[in-house]
Image (spheres, rainbow, N blue to C red):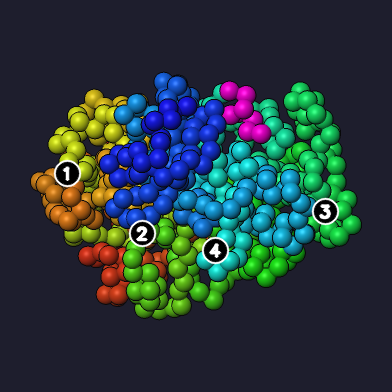
Amino acid sequence: MPSPSALAPGTLIADRYRVLRPISRSARSALVVAEHLGLGREVALRVLAPELAGSSEAMARFAREARAIAALDSPHVARVFDVGQLPSGAPFLVLELLDGVDLAALSRETRLPVAEAVELIVQACAGLAAAHAAGIVHRDVRPSHLFLTQTREGAPSLKVLGFGVAKFLESRPDDVELTDARSRLGALGYGSPEQLRDARDVDARTDVWSLGVVLHELLMGELPFRATSLHGLAIEIASDDPRPVTRADVPREIVAAVARCLARGRDLRFASVVALASALGPFGGPRASALAARLQPIATEPTTPAPAPPARPRARLRLGVIERATTRAAELEAGLAETLGEACELVPVASYRALVELLRDREIELAWLPPLAFLRARAARAAHLLATIERGGAPSFGCAILGRAAGPTTLEGVRGLRAAWTDPWSASGYVVPRAMLRQAGIDPEAEFPVELFVGGARAVVAALREGAADVGPVHCVLAPSGTLVSGPWSEADGLRVLGLGGPVPCDALCAGPSLDAARRAEARRRLLSPAPSLLAGLEATGTRDPDARLYELFRLAFLS
C-alpha cells in the first residue's frame, strides 16, 4: 500500500492536490479525500499500491479504468478529472467525490421496495448504455460497483464504478487482457456463463446478465444461485437454472425480466441495457420511466442484426453527429433544413462506432462522418458519400500532435508521458498520429503509461490545457507546402506543436441505406450549394463533390 506518510493529511500531491482525510484501503489501492488547490474543490484521489507499480497487469488495469471512465460522459458514471504519478512511481486517479453508499452495503441493511430497486437498476442501465455506446463492456457489474448518492434536489442518483477490467470492443494492440482469476471473472456470482468460459468472448449482454443478478439480489436478499464454493458456483451458473424471484409484491413482468436477463444463451437475453431499461421503466416510478424513454436514442452493442426491413418514410431527416463535433447544434440543424428543403433533426451520438451502427440499422438517414468511420461504414454497406466538408478551402486536412508548453519540444520527448486521444475510430485523433509516432521510432503501444479517450479535438486541447494529459493529437488545416494554417487551439491554451502529419481526407456528409438513389442524388445536389447557416454549424468554409480516391489513398496508407 502507499505508505501512511505518502498519503497523510496535509501531503501535497502533484503540486495541486492536498490530502485531507482517508476514505478506504485495499490490497490494490488507497482512496483519500483531497482538495484541488486551484479550484478549492474536494475530490477523491485513488493511488495504486506501490508494490503493484512494478506489475504490468496492475498498471494496465489502473490505466484501463482511467481510459474507460474518461471516454464516457454520463451522470450515471463517476467522472474522472485527472491522472498522474507519485514520486514513488505509483499512479493516481482523481475522481469526483461521492457521498453515499454502494448497493452492497445497502442490500445488507434492507430489502428495497420494488419501485426503488427498479429505479436504481434503470439508472445503472443508463451508465452502462453510455459505456456500451462507446464500445466498452464493464465485465464487473456488482453491487459494490454501483454507488448510490443524491442529486442537488435530493433525488437518488446511481453511479457506475469499477471499470478496471472493462473490455474495449474496438480491439487495440495496446490492450492487455487481465488474467488473474478475480480479474477474469469479476465477482464470480455476478459473471455470465460466457464470461466464466472466456472473459474475452463477451459483449454488452454480459452486463445485462450481471444487472439481472443484482436486481434479483436487491429484491430477494440473496443471489439466484445456491452454491457456496467458488467451484460449485461456477458449475451452477454454467449448467443450472437460476432461482426465480418469488417475492409476492414483485409484478410478474419484473419476474420475467430478471429471468430473461439470466438466460444462459445470450441471444435469449435482452439485446441491450437500453431494452432492459425499457422493460423495467414503467415499474420504477416517474423518474425511472422518463429515464428509460430518454435512453432509446443511445446505440448499444447487441448481436449482429438481422437484415433490416424496408425503411418507413420519416417526417424528418435525421443527421447523426458526434456529441462533441460542434458547438453550434442549433445552426447546424436549421442550416441543414434550409439546405435540403425539408425538416431535419440532429441525433447526437457518443461514439463513431455507434454512429455507423445507427446508419447501418436505418435509425438515421444522414451522418457526419470522419474518414475512418466512413470507410468502415462503407465496408458494412451502410454509407454513401454526399459531400466533403472543407476547412480552410482544402479537400483534406492534417494532424497536429500537441504537447504542453512546459513539456517536450519534439516528438522524441513524449516517451513516458500521458496521452489523450479522441476516439479509436478517428483518423487525425488516433490512427494517423500513432503512425507518425511509429515513423519517429516511438512505439505508441508501449511508451504511454496512461492513455485517455476524451471524444473530440476540443476535449484533447482541454485535457492538455488542464494538465490531465501531456500529449495529444488534433485535426488541423495544412497549406499545400505542409505548413500549419490553423487548428482548434489558441495561444492562450499554452500548447506547442510537436509534429504535423497527413494528409487526411476531410469529414464528409453521408447517406445511409434508408435513402434511395434518387433522394441521395437530390441531397448531394443541395449540399453542394449549402446555406451559410449550415456552414456555420459545420464550422466549415465550404462543401465540395467528394473525391473517393482521397479516401482510398488514406486507406492504403494507414489501414492496409
Q: CA distance from mark 2 to mark 1?
A: 26 Å
Residue assigned mark 2 = 325
> How would you rate the neighbour count of disc 1 (Cα within 10 Å): few for under 14, some for 14-19, many for 20 or more?
some
Residue wearing tag 1: 405
* Image: magenta residue range: 180-187
Tell me where residue 525 appears, x and y as whole percent: 34, 69
Residue that mark 3 sits on: 255
Q: Which of the 4 image quadrants contains residue 233?
A: top right
The tally of labels here is 4
| Mark toward the start of the polypeptide (4 vs 2) | 4
Where is residue 238 shown, x and y percent of the image? 77, 31
Find numbered disc 2 in the image and state the secondary structure of the residue it sits on: loop
* Residue 428 vertical position relative to residue 254 in the rendered view, above or below: above
- Residue marked by disc 4: 151
Please, what is the three-letter code of the amino acid marked with disc 2? Ala
**In the visual, does 144 lie left or right of 525?**
right
* Residue 322 x, y percent position in the rendering: 41, 58
Which residue sits at x=19%, y=29%? 412
> Residue 164: in sight, yes or no?
yes
